[in-house]
Image (cartoon, grey):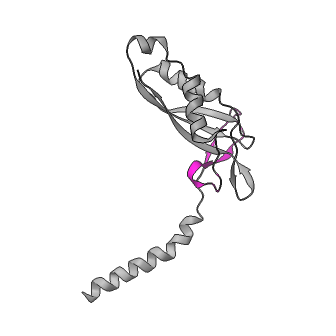
Amino acid sequence: MLKQLRLALLMTLTLTAALPMVAQVRHVTTVNPSTKQSYMEVYEFEYVDIQPQFPGGERGLINFINKTREYPYKAYKNRIQGRVLCSFIVGTDGRVSDIRVVRGAGDDSLNREAVRVIGEMPKWSVGKVGNHAVPVRVVLPIAFRL
């Protein structure tokens, strides 16, 4: 019993000591933008102090997608549904770039439409670390339902 209590206390102290270190870690990935020679650091959405935001917030984003999205005729005719998971980067100027399909819906026309919708987005408010604007990767699902 005493041995188990000591082990539990040791684990608690270890976890408590490690927490401040975890909070300071920033997850940064490197992507190659359209230029072949330059690379930039991109912060992950969850690990910035201020996250980028679509104008109008989450409700504005949903309204924009619903207004802009057009169901591709081929997919509609064949009754194909699905969700396209896309990633993109909100740059330090708020513009959306480097749009990619992470997981497609099984139909290429749905994937292309999701990329088109994201490409038409207006400027976002920028993500920040401290007081500095940084490029941030955002992952966004776009659903196609009949």
**Start-end of magenta stretch:** 29-50
Rendered position, 51 above or below 59: below
Where residue 68 sits: x, y (%)?
59, 23
- Counting the numbered discs, the total is 0
Q: Residue at x 24, y 86 (%)?
A: 1
Q: Residue at x 39, y 77 (%)?
A: 11
Where residue 16 sits: x, y (%)?
48, 76
Q: Residue at x 41, y 78 (%)?
A: 12
Q: Residue furthest left?
A: 1
Rendered position, 5 above or below 65: below
- Left/right of residue 37 with respect to residue 2 in the rendered view: right
Q: Residue furthest bottom?
A: 2
Q: Residue at x 73, y 44 (%)?
A: 92
Rendered position, 137 above or below 119: below
Q: Nearer the viewer, residue 93 or 43?
A: 93
Where residue 50 sits: x, y (%)?
65, 53
Residue 36 drawn in magenta: yes
Where residue 128 sits: x, y (%)?
69, 52
- Left/right of residue 18 with respect to residue 57 in the rendered view: left
Quadrant for the C terminus, please: top left
| Residue 99 found in image quarter | top right
Residue 64 drawn in magenta: no
